[in-house]
Amino acid sequence: MTKLTTPAAVVDALDKLYSEAVEALSGALDLYLHKGTPPEANLRDSGAFCYPQIRLTYDPDGPPPPISRAFGKMSEAGTYISSFTRPDFFRPYLIEQLTPLMRDYDIEVVVERSSQEIPYAYVWEQGQAEGLEEISPAELARWFPSPQLADIGDEVADGELYEPYETHPLALFDGPRVDLSLKRLQHYTGTPVEHFQHYVLFTNYHRYVDAFCDWALTQIGTDSHYTSLSVPGGLEVSDVTEASRADIDAAPWRRYQMPAYHLRAPNGAGITLVNIGVGPSNAKTITDHLAVLRPQVWLMVGHCGGLRHSQSIGDYVLAHAYLREDHVLDAVLPPEIPVPALAEVQVALQEAAARVTGETGDALKRRLRTGTVVTTDDRNWELRFTASARRFNKSRAIAIDMESATIAANGYRLRVPYGVLLCVSDKPLHGEIKLPGAANRFYERAIGEHIRIGIETLEMLAADKGAKLHSRKLRAFDEPPFR
C-alpha cells in the first residue's frame, strides 16, 4: 500500500479498486447466468468483490489543533476507516472532505480493499438482468454476495459510541448503506440519483409540483445557471418548447411513491423538489435515503392547520421548534432530544418571504408567524382533540401538520441542515375546516408564492455554495471527520 498525498490521488485509487470489483462481480454473474459456471472460491477469498476503503491514520505528537469548523477535522488520534461506493459519483464530495484533513493534519492515507463485499444487486444493470429473475435469490446467494440487513445500519449516525482502542469510522455511512439508498431513491422517485441536486425542497401536495415546473421552465435557456428539468420516468427538458409543459404532465410520475423533479445546474447547484405525500413515514423514508447524498440543505414547504385565532388562510408559519407526535424516529432520536432551529436557514427563509411577498415590518409579521409546529401521525387528530388540547396548549404550538418535525428531526439526526416554512390551509380549531371549495381558493392564491419563497431561500443559501450552512450544532463530540 502506497501512502497517498493528494485528495485526487485518493479518489483515483478508490475508483480503480471499485471498478475492478464491479468488473469482477459483473463478469462472474454474466458467466453464471449464461453458462451456469459459479465463481471460483478463491475469487471471493481474495476480496475481488469487495468495496474499497480509506484507512486514515492520525498519530500527532500532541493534542489535535483546536480547529473550529464543523467538519473536516480530527478530534482525537487513531485509525479511521470507512468503505465507499461509486467514487466517480461522489468524487466532488470526497475531495471536499479530504482536502482540509490532508492540508491541516499530519495524517497517513491509504486505499485498500475492505472486507465488505458488494452485493450483486448493486452492480447488475437492468439490461444485463434478463433471465436473472428466473434464478432464485437463494441460489444466487450461494455463489454471490447478497444484501444482508445485518450489514446495513445507521449506528454511526445514531451516535453509538465506539469501544476503546477500536478503529473509528471516517464517514457517517459506509458502502453497503449508501448503495441501498441509491437504489431506493431511484425506486421511490423515478429519477436517476445522478440528477439529484444539493438543495432540496419537500412538499406534500402535487399542486406545488405544478407551480415548481411552471417556474422551472421559465429559467431554462435564459441567463440563469439552470440547464434542464428532469422529471420522473426519464424525461429531461433542456430545450423548452410549447409542448414541454404537456410532456411533463404526461410523464409517468404517478407510478412512483415520491416523485422527484430536478432543476439541474452545474456541479449539482440546482434544486430538487420531492413530493413526499402525506405522513411522517414517507418523510422519514425519503430523508433516510437522501442523506447519503450529503445535500447542503433540505426545506419543507407544505400545508398546515393554523392553531391560532389570529391566523388567516394563506398565512405562513416559520417553524422554530417542534412538538414531535410523529413517533417514527422515537427509537433512534427520543422526543426529549431538542431539535434546534438553524439561524442561517431561519434568516434566509424570513428574508426570502419578504422578497417574494414584497411585505416588510408589521405587514410581514401579520402574515408570517414564528413558533412551534406539532407534527402528528394521525391525520384525523381532530377526532380526538379533547385528548390533545392540553398538550398543544402547553407547547404554545401555532400550527399542526404531518411531516415537518420528521423532516427537521431526521436532518438533525443525519447532519443535514433543515428548515420548515408552512402555509395555513385551514383553521380546524376555529371553524375553518378544510373543505373542497375553500381549498381551491386557497390553492389558487397561495401555492405559487409559497414555492417561490422556498426557491428563493435555496438560491440565497446557495450563493456562497452552502459555506454558512454546516453548523456545529449538528455535530457530536465523537463525530466522524467527514461531513
Image: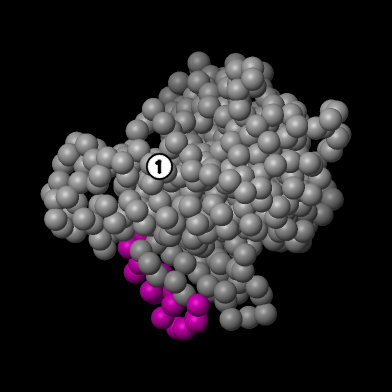
x, y percentage for residue 181?
44, 44
- In this rendering, would 174 be left or right of 417? left
Q: Position of residue 335 (x, y in %)?
A: 59, 21
- Foreground residue among 421 and 309: 421
Badge 1: few (under 14), some or many (20 or more) residues near its Cα, within 10 Å?
some
In this view, the residue in front, 73 or 184, is: 73
- Magenta stretch holds residue 249: yes
User: Residue 57, image x and y in percent?
Assistant: 68, 36
Residue 173, above or below 6: above
Q: Residue at x 65, y 32 (%)?
A: 79
Question: Residue at horizontal 70%, vertical 55%?
Answer: 6
Q: Amino acid at mark 1?
A: Gly
Image height check: is 459 above or below 99? below
Q: Which residue is mark 1?
A: 47
Q: Quadrant of residue 343?
A: top right
Picture residue at 65% right of the left edge, 58% below the top: 8
In what element is the residue under mark 1?
loop
Q: Does the rendering let one see residue 341?
A: no
Q: Is the residue 149 above or below the residue 260 in the image?
A: above
Say whether residue 356 is visible.
Answer: yes
Residue 331 lies left or right of residue 233; in this view the side is right
Q: Image quadrant for the C terminus?
A: top right
**Magenta region: which residues?**
238-253
Q: Please state the horizontal and vertical placement of residue 279, each as a whole percent of the image.
A: 45, 37
Q: Is residue 124 left or right of residue 99?
A: left
